[in-house]
Amino acid sequence: MLVSPARKTPDMDAPTSLARGNLWNKIREWATAHPYWTLTIAVFIALGPFLSKPFNMDDPLFIWTARQIHTHPLDPYGFNVNWYGSASPMWSVTQNPPLACYFLALAAGILGWSEIALHGACLLPALAVILGTYRLARRFCDHPMLAALATLFTPVFLVSSTTVMCDVLMLAFWMWAVVLWVEGMERDATWPLAGAGLLIALAALTKYFGACLIPLLALYILTSKRRLGRWAGFLLIPLLALGIWQWATQTLYHHALLSEAADYARRTSGFFSGARITAVMTALTFTGGCLSATIFMAPWLWRPRTLLALAAGAALLAIALFCQGAFLHGFYWIQGWFRFSMETQIVLWAISGALVLALVAADMRTRRDASSWLLALWVLGTFAFTGILNWTINGRSILPMAPAVGILLARRWQPPAGRNGRILIPLAASALFAFLVARSDYLLAAAVRQSAWQTYEKYGRGPQTMWFEGHWGFQYYLTELGGQAASGKHFILRHGDYLAIPVNNTNLKMPPGPGEELEADGPRYLTDMNINVGAGFYTSKGGALPFAFGPVRPEYVLVYTASSLEAKP
């Protein structure tokens, strides 16, 4: 007699489903009850994989200054550096105040100068930004955790937080200055306002852009209380600090570095040039790409008809500029499929950038309160600085608006009752994408370091001199090994010497003769800095996109000898 097997009934799966549901509910309840710990864990999970990232781009300038501070703390820029082809005083090369370098010097004194040590120290400012975003968002929206995570899971924040430059530290001071200012005004309390004034000063002495907080917070008060008061006195603290810095640098270096940085931005931005519309369009593209969480969340925030209208408008503007021919004139060598791919990506991220600006407009239309004015001026001021005033368009200039955009996204999110979890889908997609961009930046830095090591291993161990052009991480690591930067005034390649040139770099004078190639594998299909695919996260002079998809050639170095330079091409 055959007995049929027992069938699975829904009740048999109930304990497993119930257990999973209970686990998820417990996690959600714990995260809700401990938001600061939850965000701390999220920051360490997001940035922990990049602690060993090699130094690259402008990292060396900050590290060299920190080493100078370590031995001469009152003379941060009292040394020479070859960054533009000849030895120059550091004060003439850098355009940033030194507070971030003091932070690195302090961290290195405790932890050492390794990549892991300095990146580990830089986790603290990154964490401060995210916790500050949450603290401010609690007053401005109903979903502060969403605002903080939407800030964390953007390419611009993850990439910037894996450098040792000044941007994230400046933003940390910025965020908590805003928090203390808003809370101090609400309670009419003296100490929070005084603390905010001090933090504004620290932000401005970390990166001059931090001084923009002075007019921003003044306008916030005028839009809320519409009268002058004793609060205005606290904004004199950062003005006094900047004045002291101006005087100190004039005394030390016979050059007032604050005014010289402003003059540098004016001279190099081309404010009155006819290409300004192109720069604004590039800023829109960088805004959309760097803050890509906006486009991932857009279907949950906008009606399809509104989304279509915004997308069509941004796409038509980009296409019109393509047809004009001026937008990508500087990248004439990119043709064929690669040109089409770059233009398609520009359209995509221009749409995302338009959505960021639409968030500002929609929030102003629906709320019209002091917080709306603060967020709007925060975003639009940063956008105007990036596209009009700054000497170049880059992700580092976009970074300060990331927390404001995260809060705007959370203010826009109005889920049906009991359906808050829907936003986890685009948030997870945004986190994955931001991680991939940060990983490509990590791989690029690793390839640059590897190319420097390979070059020295093959050509630099003999009695001859290992000269090189180019800067960024290649200069840092090759100098550490004993290479010497070529100087236009005093450089002579003698018999037996070598000259190495990393092609994906800057400040190069390519010789006409043939050179031997050395390759190091880096990112393959996504990169944030490669002129051949139009990616220029660190400067739009290297690409019209903050990052680009497409086949990426390995990092390669051309090595020349005196005889190869004498050969005709």
Image: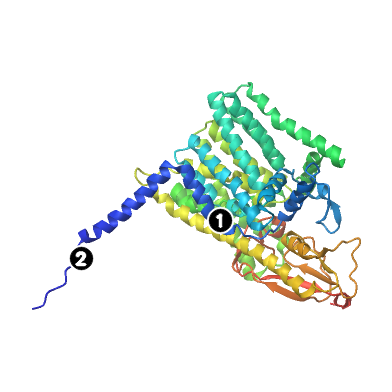
Label 1 residue SS: helix
Q: Can residue 274 be seen by looking at this rendering?
A: no
The span from disc 2 to disc 1 (Cα, nearest Å) is 44 Å
Q: Nearer the viewer, residue 394 or 303?
A: 394
Q: Residue at x 91, y 62 (%)?
A: 490
> In x, y percent, where is residue 222?
60, 26
Amino acid on which the number 2 mark rests in the picture: Lys
| Among the 4 quarters of the image, the one containing residue 320 | bottom right
Residue hosting label 2: 8
Secondary structure beneath dot 2 equals loop
Q: Image height check: is 305 above or below 530?
A: above
| Sequence-first disc among 2 and 1 | 2
- Indicate the quadrant where residue 455 lies: bottom right
Circle 1 packing at 10 Å, graded few (<14), some (14-19), many (20+), is some
Q: Give the side of residue 519 with respect to residue 422, left or right.
A: right
Q: Position of residue 367 (x, y in %)?
A: 49, 34
**Quarter of the image where the N terminus is located:** bottom left
**What amino acid does circle 1 point to?**
Gly
Q: Are marks 2 and 1 in contact (CB under 8 Å)?
A: no
Residue that numbered label 1 is attached to: 48
